[in-house]
Image: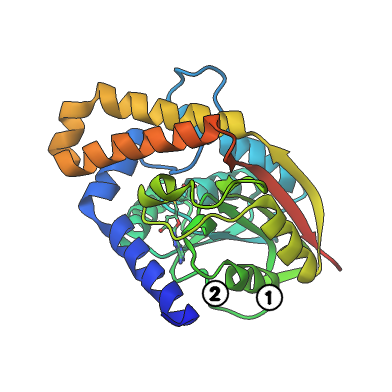
Amino acid sequence: MPEDAGAASITSTTEAYYDSSEADSFYATIWGGEDIHIGIYEHPDEEVARASTRMVETMALRLGHLKKAHRVLDVGAGYGGAGRALATRFGCRVDCLNLSEVQNERNRLLTKAAGLEDRVRVVHANFESIPGPEEAYDAVWSQDAILHSGARERVLSEVSRVLKPGGHFVFTDPMQTDDCPPDVLQPVLDRIHLDSLASPSFYRKNLAGLGFDEIEYGEMVSQLRTHYDRVRQELGARQSEMVERCGIDYVTRMLEGLGHWVNAADRGHLTWGILHFRKRG
Ligand SMILES: C[S@@+](CC[C@H](N)C(=O)[O-])C[C@H]1O[C@@H](n2cnc3c(N)ncnc32)[C@H](O)[C@@H]1O
């Protein structure tokens, strides 16, 4: 398959997956409806929603300079929890760009209920082709979304295009380690129909090539391990309710898939944390 056709096919598979009622019910129920990302846990039994909120708070510390006049783009924004948190904390304007209209609809409702419609805008788009002019944003934010792309170089070049010189790019992405052996991750990829995972060296090399300086990679792979184990535990504990909502096939496959993520983390094949880069002025 030509590269573009491959990336387009991954995008449509991802869109169908996140728009499905099974996936929407699973994420909205287990995470609580605001977020869908790896959390920071103070203890392994903590609520997924609390750990997810703490993750947003921790990542937002990297953008402590943001003011009311600033504009932020969240790529792969899910239900928009981070966008609302940033708009509330800094008064800035946030564009939540996301492929799934099912999630976008929930985002619009939550944003309206929070009285943030003047600060948070929901944009239905593909992050491989970001709408809008160049140098429009003071910061670009993304949590656990770029893993879904079959054209990650394009996503990074789009981020670079829309970011102002001197702007910050702060993001997380579950990645394979730089020394991960080939062909060991297929069961991990299968859980949510992924094609491949990026690695820290992939981001370093490509972002350096686009004129970004690395500020830090705050590695936290133990949180990834805790998170997938915690989600698996929660899904197991609420199995009959979740089978009602999502169906037995989805729940069985998800329990198995989450186990593969925990095992891959134990074997040292995965890494995750906050990647913080700055576009040269
Ligand atoms: C694991 S969820 C994370 C959502 C959100 N960032 C959060 O932390 O709550 C991954 C998100 O990436 C979005 N996504 C996947 N591929 C995308 C694409 N090509 N363009 C835009 N969004 C995409 C999905 O719709 C989904 O909302």
How would you rate the neighbour count of disc 1 (Cα within 10 Å): few for under 14, some for 14-19, many for 20 or more?
some
The residue lying toward the viewer, choosing from 211 and 105, is: 211
Residue 146 shows in this picture: yes
Picture residue at 50% right of the left edge, 26% below the top: 226
Disc nearer the start of the sequence (1/2): 2
Instruction: Specify whether 62 is left or right of 264.
Output: right
Most foreground residue, 168 or 105: 168
| Type of amino acid under label 2 | Ile
Q: Amino acid at mark 1?
A: Arg
* Number of marks: 2
Q: Can you tell which quarter of the image residue 71 is in?
A: bottom right
Whole-percent x, y for residue 200 in the image:
68, 51
Q: Where does the C terminus fall, quadrant-wise?
A: bottom right
Q: Position of residue 104 (x, y in %)?
A: 37, 59
Q: Quadrant of ligand 1?
A: bottom left
Residue 165 visible, this angle? no
Q: Is residue 175 above or below residue 154?
A: above
Question: From mark 1 to mark 2, how far is it between C-alphas?
Answer: 9 Å
Instruction: Say which residue label 1 marks.
Output: 161
- Residue 234, x across and y down, in percent: 33, 25
Q: In the displayed structure, would residue 224 be above or below residue 196?
A: above
- Residue found 55% across the figure and 32% down from its top: 267
Q: Secondary structure at mark 2?
A: loop
Mark 2, residue position: 130
Question: In percent of the image, x 50 and y 36: which residue is there?
Answer: 264
Classify 10 Å Cα crowding around label 2: few (below 14), some (14-19), many (20 and above).
some
In the picture, which quadrant includes the N terminus? bottom left
Q: Position of residue 273 (x, y in %)?
A: 64, 41
Q: Are marks 1 and 2 in contact (CB under 8 Å)?
A: yes
- Write down the quadrant of residue 243 in the picture: top left
Circle 1 SS class: helix
